[in-house]
Image: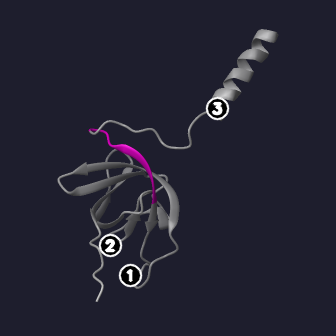
C-alpha cells in the first residue's frame, strides 16, 4: 500500500514540475507553438475577436512560415483564412497568404512576416 501511495505521490509531483511551454521539435517536423489568430468576418470588412492560445506547429521554408493547426481546432475564429493575421509568442505578426486543409486532418496556413508599418 505504501509503495502504491509513494508511486502516486511521485507521479503527481512530476506533473506539477512539468513546464508550461510546449516542447521543441526538429526542423523537419516543425516547432510546437501557441499563436493568436485574428480572422476576418464573412464579408472581409473587419477583424473578428482574436482567438488566443491556439496550438500549432510552425515550419519555416524559404522565407515562408507554415502554421499547421489541428482540424478540430481550426474552426470559427481559430481558422486563419487568407489575409488573416497570426501572432506568435514573440509578438511577430504574420499575414496568411493561403490556407487549406491537408490530407492528414490539419489546417495549413502559409504565411509571410507582416512588413513593418512606415511612420510618416
Colouring of the image: one colour
Q: Which mark is residue 83?
A: 2
Question: Which residue occupies 76% across, 13% down?
Answer: 4
Which residue lies under the disc numbered 3?
A: 15
Report which quarter residue 32 is drawn in. Answer: top left
Mark 2 → mark 3, Cα distance in angstroms = 39 Å
Residue pushed farthest right?
Answer: 1
- Frontmost residue, 41 versus 32: 32
- Please state the horizontal and vertical placement of residue 7, each as a whole percent of the image: 71, 16
- Relative to residue 113, is residue 107 depicted above or below? above
Q: Do tag 2 and tag 3 residues touch (Cβ < 8 Å)?
A: no
Residue at (32, 36) in percent of width and height? 26
Name the main secondary structure of what is drawn in magenta: strand
Q: Within 10 angstroms of label 2, few (less than 14), some, or many (20 or more) residues?
A: some
Q: Quadrant of the C terminus?
A: bottom left
Distance from disc 3 to disc 1, alpha carbons, whole Å, reads 43 Å
Q: CA distance from mark 2 to mark 1?
A: 9 Å
Label 2 residue SS: loop
Residue 111 image position (x, y, % from top left): 28, 62
Q: Earlier in the sequence, mark 2 or mark 1?
A: 1
Which mark is drawn over residue 55?
none
- In the image, the segment drawn in magenta is 28-35
Q: Secondary structure at mark 3?
A: helix
Q: Give the percent coordinates (x, y) of residue 36.
A: 46, 62
> Relative to 6, does residue 20 appear above or below in the rendering?
below
- Please tell me which residue is depicted at 43% across the width and 49% down the height of the picture: 33
* Residue 44 disc label: 1
Q: Earlier in the sequence, mark 3 or mark 1?
A: 3
Amino acid at each position: 500500500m505504501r509503495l502504491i501511495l509513494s508511486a502516486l505521490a511521485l507521479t503527481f509531483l512530476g506533473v506539477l514540475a512539468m513546464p508550461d511551454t510546449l516542447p521543441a521539435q526538429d526542423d523537419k517536423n516543425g516547432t510546437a507553438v501557441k499563436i493568436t489568430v485574428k480572422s476576418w468576418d464573412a464579408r472581409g470588412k473587419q477583424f473578428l475577436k482574436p482567438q488566443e492560445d491556439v496550438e500549432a506547429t510552425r515550419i519555416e521554408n524559404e522565407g515562408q512560415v507554415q502554421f499547421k493547426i489541428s482540424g478540430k481546432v481550426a474552426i470559427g475564429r481559430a481558422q486563419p483564412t487568407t489575409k488573416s493575421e497570426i501572432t506568435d509568442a514573440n509578438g511577430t505578426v504574420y499575414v496568411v497568404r493561403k490556407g487549406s486543409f491537408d490530407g492528414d486532418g490539419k489546417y495549413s496556413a502559409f504565411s509571410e512576416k507582416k512588413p513593418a508599418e512606415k511612420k510618416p
